Amino acid sequence: MSRIGKLPIQIPSGVTITVDQDIITVTGPKGKLSQPLLSHVAIVIENDVLTVTRKSDEKIAKAQHGLMRALLNNLVLGVTKGFEKKLEVNGVGYRVSGGGQNLNLTLGFSHPVTYAAAEGIQLTVEKNLITVSGLDKQQVGQVAAEIRALKKPEPYKGKGIKYTDETIIRKAGKTGAK
């Protein structure tokens, strides 16, 4: 049995879960998210506790068991607390401005870079920190990865955009000795 899949999900007050034929919709204080239901698992809601069970012991059912539980837990956390990732811009002359849905970045290119986030994502800027926040964990991670990909940190001086909890392994430069 899946160690993740067998864990029950507590449904907080203010959160409603509706299970249609092939879509699960979670509505909470921050918004509404939906997820397609995987075919080899079943959803049971009793006494504000959601459990995921698999329909058979096939390999695909075992794989979908833990996956569906993790996706549903992320939906519940998203509509109650939300998710966020923080990025840090390092480098001389590297600047970031904007917020809301758009970022204006100066990253050492011959032109400024403009990034427009998808709907449902909120971008905030404080000095050299970018905070990406939203309800959908996958979407928040994807937007953060796209912003980081604009100028990945380089290993010699550490210039670029990195996650705040990321450590950049530094390399030694040229020695100049013969």
Image (cartoon, rainbow, N blue to C red):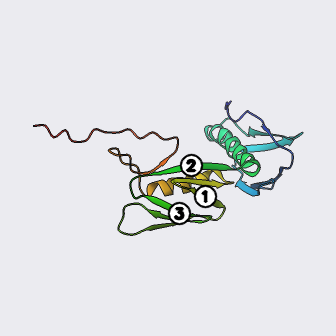
**Mark 1 and mark 2 in contact (Cβ < 8 Å)?**
no
Find residue 97 and name its label: 3
Q: Residue at x 68, y 39 (%)?
A: 65
Residue placed at 71% from the left, 54% from the top? 35
| Residue 46: x %, y % from top left | 88, 40
User: At 46% from the left edge and 59% from the top edge, which residue is drawn?
Assistant: 95
Mark 3 crowdedness (10 Å alpha carbons): few <14, some 14-19, many ≥20: some
- The alpha-carbon separation of the residues under discs 3 and 2 comes to 15 Å
**Mark 2 or 1, nearer chain start:** 2
Image quadrant where one finds the C terminus: top left
Q: CA distance from mark 3 to mark 1?
A: 9 Å
Q: Quadrant of residue 125?
A: bottom right
**SS category of the residue bearing label 3:** strand
Left or right of 135, for residue 152: left
What amino acid type should be assigned to the residue bearing mark 3? Ser
Contact check, label 3 and label 2, Cβ < 8 Å = no
Q: Amino acid at mark 2?
A: Lys
Circle 1 packing at 10 Å, graded few (<14), some (14-19), many (20+), is some
Q: Residue furthest right?
A: 47
Q: Is residue 40 visible?
A: no
Q: Is residue 170 visible?
A: yes
Secondary structure beneath label 2: strand
Between residues 47 and 159, which one lies in front from this camera angle? Answer: 159
Q: Which residue is mark 1?
A: 124
Residue closest to the eye, 67 or 32:
32
Furthest residue to the left? 178
Q: Looking at the picture, how far across and down is residue 128, in whole percent?
A: 51, 53
Secondary structure of the residue carrying numbered label 1: strand
As measured in the structure, the alpha-carbon distance from the residue carrying label 2 to the one carrying label 1 is 10 Å
- Which residue position holds label 2? 86
